[in-house]
Every structure is written in C-alpha cells, then in structure tokens.
Image (cartoon, rainbow, N blue to C red):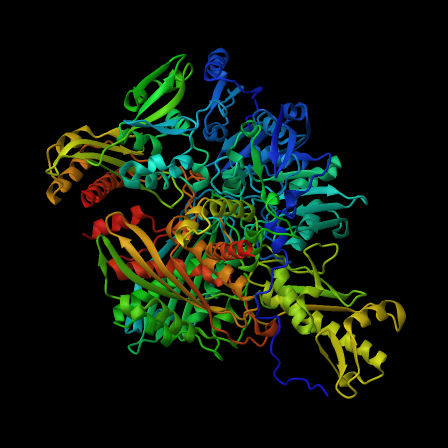
Amino acid sequence: MPKKDKKEELKVVGKSVEKYDGLPLTTGQPLFTDDINLSDMIHAKLLTSPFAHAEIVDIDTTEAEKFPGVKIVLTYKNTPRIPHTTAGQGYPEPSPYDAFVFDKKVRFVGDRVAAVGAETPEIAEEALKLIKVKYKNLPSVFDPEEAMKEGAPVIHDEDESTGIYDKERNIVSHVEVEVGDVDKAIKDADFKIEGYYTKTQYAQHVPMETHITITYLDENNRLVIRSSTQVPFHVRRIISQILGIPINNIRVVKPRIGGGFGTKQEIVLEDICALMTLRTKRPVRMEYTRREEFISGRTRHPSKIYIRLGADSSGILTGIDMRVVLNTGAYGTHGPTVLFNVGSKSLPIYNKAKNVRFVGDAVYTNLPIAGAYRGYGATQAYFALETAIDELSEKMGIDPVEFRKRNHIKEGETSPIFEKLGEGKEGIPQIIESCALDKCIEIGKKEIEWDRWRNKRVKKGSYIRGVGMAILMQGSGIALIDMGSCEIRMNDDGSFQLLTGATDIGTGSDTVLTQIAAEELKTDYRNFFVYSSDTDFTPFDTGAYASSTTYISGGAVLRAAKDLKAKIINYAAKLLKEDPDNLYIMDSTVISKKSGKSITYKEIGLKSYYEENQEHLIGVGSYVSPKSPPPFAAHFVLIDVDTETGKIIPVKYVAVIDAGVVIHPKLARGQSIGAIVNGLGYALTEEIKFTKTGASTNPTFFDYKILTSLDLPEIVVKFVPTYEPTGPFGAKSVAEVNINGPLPSISNAVYDAVGIRLKEAPFTPEKVFKLLKERV
Amino acid sequence: MLKNVKEYLYPESLTEALDLLKKKGKSARVVGGGLDIIWRSPKSVEYLIDLENLGLSYIEEDEEKIKIGAKTTIGEAQKSLVVGKLFKGKLTKVFSEIATPIIRNVISFGGSVARNYPWSDITAILLSLDASLVIFTGEEKEMTLSEFMRVEIREFLDEAIIKEVRIKKFDPSYHFSYIRFTRTAADIPLLDEGILLKFDKEKKVEDAIVVVGARPFGPIRMEDVEDFLLGKTLTDEVIGKAKELVMDTVKVADDMRISGDYRRELTGVLTKRNLMSIREEI
Amino acid sequence: MKIKFKLNGEYVEFDAYPGESLFELLRRNGHTEVKGNNCKTGECGACTVLLDGVPVPSCTILAGRVKDRSVITIKGIGNVEKPHPLQKSFVEEGAVQCGYCIPGIILSMKALLDENPNPTREDIKKALSGHLCRCTGYIQQIEAVEKAIKLLKEEKNA
C-alpha cells in the first residue's frame, strides 16, 4: 500500500519552471496596454504648467475647442473638484487628499493645466497651443527645510484638502517616536558620532514603458479602464470616488506592463481618460512621452537625514537618533508612508540599541511629485545608517563587519520600533521568526575577499581599490493592511483556472503563484491557466507594492489551494465511499491509504461537472498577515577609484539574501540583480537637476543616465534559505531589499579606498574629484 | 513624426538630389542617417530628399587614402577591413565606442559632419586625422574638414551635398589615440581628445595634431601644444608639460553636465593618457 | 505616400505619412510587436528592428528610407509554436521580466550571432549596451545569449 512520505520533497516550489508569459513575450504577442486598436479612438494630450507655482487667473479654451478634430477639452472649469490622493493605497489612505483632476493653481513645472482629446495625437498637440492661460506667478520654494520656515509660500492653501499635518508650514506628515532616552544615551556613550548627515537626490524609476491608459465603454455601457498600473483595485475605487460613479460600473484591467517599480502605484492618467470617455462615449488613449514621464511622472523622495550614534566600549550600540527631512514635491502622495518607512525599515535591524529616536517631516516643495519607489524610504535610510555605522566602527577601531555581527537583529528577537512605526501611524509588534543575516554576512565577506582588500588601498596606476559593505532589511507586505485573495476553479478535465488579483508587473508573479498552487494541490504546474488583475473577474488584491506579492498574494493562493484540496477530498470521499480522513493526494490523484482505491483529477472533473453529486469544485482564500517578516541581505562591493578623474568603477558586487524559501530561483536572482543595478545607477549616475525656476534640466535619456550592460561590475547573488512559518512554503519577499545596498556599500568602499566620506548622492566623478582635491 | 513634411522624394542621381535641394530651398533636407532630422523634427521641413540608392554607402581605398561615402554608417566603418588596417585596428576600436551599437548603425559620416554637434566624436576624430571632404556642388570639390568647419555650414549645405570623407592612409610612423570621457558607456562625450603624432627614427615628434572637443564647444586644434611637441621625445617631463599647456590654453566652459573647471582638469588627464598610450606603442 | 518593402519575409505596401518614422508606420499598421515610446533618439533600443539584417532603432529611421528594403521584427524570427533558440533561451534563463525591452534585444542578439556565432562575453555585453533594461540588470540576458549559442550549435549539428 503506498505510504505518504513524512517529509515531502517540494516538487515545483524551488524550481525555476518556465515563466508563464515568457514565450508570448519573446515572440511579440500583443500583451501590453497599447497593443490593441479600438476604432473611433480619441487621443488625449496634456497641457502642463511652465511655472513652479502660480494661480491660473483664467483659462480660455474656445479656440482649442473649435480646432477641427478636437472632441473635448478639460480644465478646472468643467471637471469635478473632489480632493483625493493619487496614491494607490488601501482605504483609508494614509496620504493626504490634496490632488484634483484639474486645479486653479499649479504647483510645479509640469503640473496639470488642461487636457485635449482629439482625433489624432498631432491634432491634440496643435490644439494645446491654442489654449490661452493667464497665470499669476507666486513665489516658489524648492528646498524642504526652507519650505518649513515661517513665511515660506504655502503650497496647499486650499480649504478642501485634508490629511495634511501642517498646511501653513508645508508639512504633509510629521513623526516623532522615542524609545528610552536617546539624548542621555548618546551623551553618556563611550563612542559617538554626531553632526553626521546624508543627502539623496531626485531620481526616477524609468520604466521602459511609460504610463499609458486606454478607456472605453463596453457593450453594457460600463467604463473599462485598461491601464499600465500596479494597483487596479485602488484605481477602481479612486475613480469611483473622483467621478462619482458606482464601483460596479467600472472595470479595470491590467495587461502586461513594461515595468512599474512604484511609479505605477498611482492614478496618473486614468481620471482624465475616464472623464473623456464618459463624456464623449468614445475610447480614449493617453500616454506619457518619455519627456512627460520624467517631468510629470513620479520620483523618489529626496532626503536629508541627520544621524547620531552612541556605543559602549564593548562595541554595542546604545543610541540611535535619526532625523529626516523628505522632499515630497508638489503633492503628498506616499509622503507619510515613505516617511515612516525611513525609520520602520531601518532602525529595527540594530535592535541592540535600547535608546532610539526617530523624527521626521515630509515636506511640500514646488518640484515634481515624489511617490512610491522600490525601497520606499529604506533606500534613503540605509545610506545614512550604514555609513554612520562605518564611521562609528572606524572611531572604535572595530572592523565594520565585526561591528554589524555584534549588533544586528537575530532570529527570535524583536525591536520596539516594529510597534512604534507603521504605515503612516503606529505599527505592529513582531518577532523575527526567520533570519540568516549572520550567515549572509559570513558568506558575503568571504566571496568579496574582505580581508584581502579592506584597509589595503591597493594601487594600480591612478586607480585605488576599496571594499565596503552594508546590511539591510525590508518587509513582506504591510501587516494587518495588505490583503490578497484568490480563487481556484477545477475544469471538467481536471485542470485548473487560477484567478488572482495579484499584479504581475514583470515580476513573474503569475508563475510564482501557480507554483504555490501546484505544490499544494500536488499537480503539474502546467495544469493551470492563470488570469490576474481584472477587477471584473479576479478577486481583490491590494496590488504590487510593499514586497507583498509572494508573501501576501501567495498566502492567499495557498489558502485557496488548501480550501480546494479539502473540497476535492470531500468530493472524492463520496465517490469512493470512504472517510475523507483516509484520503490523500499525489500526482493529481486522490488515493485511499486504507483501500488503495483512487480517482484522478480528470475523472473528478468530469463527474463533478456532469455525473454525480455535481458541484463546481472551487477553492477560495484571502490572506492578510499579522506581521511583515523582513527579508535580510548583506551586500559587499569592491570598487576602484580613478583618482585622476574621480570616477568610481564598481568591480565586483556581492549580495547574499535571506528571502525565506525561494520559490523560483532564476526569477528571484534576476529580480535581485535588477534591483542592484538600479541601486548602482542611483549611487553613481542618476540625478534630476533643476533650474533656478524649478524646471528639470534633463528629462531625457540623453542626460538622465541609467546603467547599461557595459557599466556593470561582476555581480554575485546568493540565497541563504530559511523558513518563514507565516509565508507560503516558508517564503518571504525577495527583491526590493536589494535596491538599498549600493548607495551605502559604495560610500563605505570609497572611504576604504581614498579616505573620503561620500555623503551626497549621486557620487558623480566631478563630486569625488573635488573632494579628493580639497583633501590634498 | 515631422508633421509638416509634404513629400518624401527619391532622386535618381546626386545631381537630381542637389537640384531638388536648391529648388525647394530652406524647407528641404537631405536624409543622411536621419537621426538629427527625426530628433529635432524641425517644423520648417516640408521636403525630405532620400539618398539611399545613390551609391553613397561605400568604403574604398587607393594608395593614399581611404574614401568613405557620406551615407556610410559608423557601424559599417567599424566592420570594414579597410578601416581595420589603419593604426593596427585602433581606429576600428575608437569607432566601436561611439554612442551605442544600434545608434552607430544609423549615424552617417555625412550627417555627422553636416550637423557638427559640439559633442560629435566623428568630427573630433576626423579633425585629429586631418580628414578631408568631397562636396558635391554640381561638380566635386575637395576641402579639408578644418576648412569646412570654418564656413557657415548651414547656408553652405543649402546648395551642396557632402559626398565623401577621406582619411589618409597613415604609414606606421604615425600613431593615434582618442579618448572620450563619459558618464555611462552609452553616452556622448563630456570631453574628448584625439592626438595624431608622427615620429622620426629617433622617436622625436615630426608632426602633431591635438584636437579637444566637447568643451562643451566643438573640436578645435590645440596649435600651441602641437608646436610644443614638435621635435620632442615623449619623456615623462614632456608629457607633463604638454598636459599643462593643454590645460592652460584650452577654452572650456560650464554646461549643465559638468563644470568648466572640471573639464579643464579632464583635458589634462586625457592628454596625459593619450600621450602615454602612444608612447607604449612606439 | 505608399511605401513598398519586405516585412518579415513578405512584401507589403503601407500608406505612410511622408514625415513619419518606421516605428510609427509599423505600429499604426498593427505591428504591435514593435515596442517603444517613440523617444526619437534611439537610446533605449526597445523599438529595434533589423533593417537588411542590421539592428536599428525604428524610432530613428524615417519610413521613406525602407523602400524596397527588408525589415524584420521579432515576429519574423519565430513564434510560440516554433521559437527561435534566442526566444527560447531568454525564457529559460530568466532573462524576461516585464518583457518590454526584449523584442529589441533579441533582434540585436540575432544580428550579433548571425555575424559571429562565437562571441565572447565581452562581445555580447557590447552588443547589448544599446539596450536599456530596468528590470533584469542584464546579467541573465547575457547568460541567455550564451545558452542560445549552445542551442544554435546543437541545431546546426543535428
């Protein structure tokens, strides 16, 4: 009689199976938003503000409306004035309601002024020029610390906006938490770092596909929004809110999208398109040009972080004092949550410090809108924290690797910060149930040959070599807030349909989620058809952000699979006339351990549809987690500094990651490498610079430089498996954490090489050169 | 899309192309690679004159020079065995670092020279090699690139079409080095420098061309430095002095990418590296 | 104007605006397999097609230039039933994430392998450098090309 193995080997989880949409993508199938052609389509173009801060005294669209081929023109005069947030977050959103479809005021160069819908994009563009706008220029402010001072121009002075911490001082969000007595701890510390700060720049996601939305009315007169978005369900809810139409009259479909990274965790074009469709009854198409993507899209929050540290003579941290000022740009989307995340995703990693204070402000300025960007505050935080820690360990004469080993959080431990800092409000306490950070550090240190390079300043011509490191953590979903759900249906031939709200933005989640279902249902992963992110057909999911897909959406898939498994067994029990407790599943077959009788999924499918005790076997599950188990990573980088030009050349980059159980190794590695390369660009070359009047000087690939294949170091990614009991098959999130590594690691490596502390990103050659010269 | 273009014309000969250009006047443009036209999309352009089938894509040689048709792309030059013979393959290597591989398949020599962008690698390289052009004005006229860059190029090309670029076939006593300073690998140069030196049997410099470009102004010859190098051997001292002379005499300025001061420093670094690279070869 | 050229092996004749680019021409005529946002500088490489076998960014090619020439898009080298070894290896090596940059990259790589069936890793990196990818960080794409080289050799020997 076949016996059930006690410890079952995973058959599909942990294997790099063929990606579900892989071949359709490599053979050019029409999978993206713009790959459909609807007859009668109207093309929309946006008129944006040339001024950083101005009132629209009047706007005259009569000429534009008369222009042949123009179908509709929208301005503040004919659109609903409902304050909302463009941030795709769960309701009630932590972000302020400070945005309008169109306003009588403009708050940054690139802000919305009007939109034209016409028969062709060229006509729409011509018509934009015919719109006459009278502006009254207002004083503007570009530095967040200046914007908080008394007398600074008030950017959101309108009455309707809500959720802003202090309108008069342009403060969107403010946070202050303290554990213990930080001032005393640092005063009494044997070793301390004070007067230290780091600064980060305006940088952008640069997805290869810009924002694009197509809306139309279907045959039932329902509004369909087909959009390149990470958050289809939030889009549906917010559009319902702004335009006052019932949720059931809206369908949001997310096709394949060309990259998100957070910039599509927003409503960017959907409201304009939807309005135009509702009024003209015609399909409407709107996309951002690359230039518009740079100017009117979303960016990372520039930051200034002041940090003080204190440690005792045994090398244990006693106090961390972190104060951050975030520039949230002209609108507050994601401002409060990114602000809180600066602290919540970084401070717990050094839980040995008993005295911790986190103070921060997210501040409006008349600059482009900062929003969600992979890393989400942690990227800025680790720059400050991990470089300050290096300074401290140098002061104490302790090797930086050794210092981390003594102070980082370990399995079974917790940090009071988890409870104090959550999503724009208090958080949730949690105990770390999986953490291999110590192993990650050991393995990474060996792989980079730390002892060979550290402190040696090996010279080759004008190049000097240095090595640096950083330890990191992130989260897996947002505890008690992020919810995902899944439905798995059996077909009449024993195959399955998997419906999930989870949003595959190129992450391969459709594939990974199928692996989870296949593993649980003990069937081939090719037995599934996956359909995701369509609000009419797939159950709810908050969307692809906060590293939630594998952990939360995967958790929902697991529950749905377990639910279906139980139903299959119960159904089979009736057919086999056995007790369900005697039955188990193996290789798509239900088998009785008592009698040996069996029935295949195929047979069950047919019988359940047509022949006996008919029911449609459907499994349903939702998952929201009481915690957000962090993935951990240790990053090491070997660099050369060209002392004659200041150019930093990354030679080798090592990332050792604890992501729990890795479900799809190749996808996980690929995603992690992508995050690292993105982080390298953020550290070395990416920067938006502005004129004195707040206009971007480089909204093009010509001058916003992202890395190419020839700019890469050797990259080694390793995973140290742990088991996270609350994650599907032990998984946590995997990729986002890695984007936080390059900035501090490189700064630390440059210090090792040439003794210069880089505190302001990006580390361009000219910047480094100047510092080298000053030192001489 | 160039919205105002009324006609895309296919002349059957270079003469016909020139006639069309003259007839249509300022609203007509010939299409080299077309990169500049599409990028700028000037509203004034109403006629585009195709040059695809006029036999302007070639790389030939005679005893003295390499002749590159104006429509030849950098990508084609990079693959050419004829080009590969110059400086033992160094010119091929230099071509292979310009812009990106796929953009090199679009940039034409004629288009590069005609547009004369200050950051153009091609004009800097050709100037360092004392290249000349063959211009078609109804008849063929040869002029050096130096001379060409001194005319009012835009007006000049209202009634002329660049037909060919000519590079001398330098014998082994000539050595060449070109460096471009960039932010990432796919970038325009923020500063570039090309040096061509001829050495006599005692390894003394017999002839010198030193060109610095992307200053952010376009490429120019550094005549003081060229004069200084004549008759000298490339000792560390000479290289050091040449470097300083470049830094002292070059005219640079700030632009949105880097500062003039930093550029000045870079001219020194590039000079030192170019000269040392040449020294290793001789 | 009417423009006649060979597209994926078959002659076609499209209505073209005289001032439009090849990218615009192809997308307008239903060829959605050519991706890109028409940046007109060719710097991201997503819109790459093969023009007489040579990879070029289609957003920088004036449509009129392709008269009587051959243009190949990603659909011209393989399909889901019979994928080209590159189309296969890119999937197998995890080189495809969002997939937006992929058709352009695969065509560039095909041109590379057509010219040089044994490129070094450095050669592959250089050929890839005209393509921007924000998802993958390029490494697994380079590995996919190396795998395709093996697959092509096997195909040849078979």
Asked if residue A196 shows in the view, the reply is: no
* Residue at the far front in the pictured view: C157
Asked if residue C90 shows in the view, the reply is: yes
Name the residue nearer the viewer: C3 or A128.
C3
Q: Based on the displayed image, in which of its 4 quarters is residue A731 positioned?
A: bottom right
Q: Position of residue A183 (x, y in %)?
A: 35, 69
Name the residue nearer the viewer: A698 or A109.
A698
Q: Based on the displayed image, in which of its 4 quarters is residue B202 positioned?
A: top left
As drawn, is C129 to the left or to the right of A45? left
Q: Position of residue A679 (x, y in %)?
A: 43, 56
Name the residue nearer the viewer: A152 or B23.
B23
Q: Position of residue A755 (x, y in %)?
A: 24, 59
- Eyeballing the image, is C5 above or below A755? above
Q: Based on the displayed image, in which of its 4 quarters is residue A22 positioned?
A: bottom right
- Eyeballing the image, is A688 above or below A315? above
Q: Quadrant of the N terminus of chain B?
A: top right
Q: Position of residue A327 (x, y in %)?
A: 45, 50
As drawn, is C3 to the left or to the right of A413? right
As drawn, is C26 to the left or to the right of A737? right
Q: How many marks can you see?
A: 0
Name the residue nearer the viewer: A654 or C96.
C96
Q: Quadrant of the C terminus of chain B?
A: top left
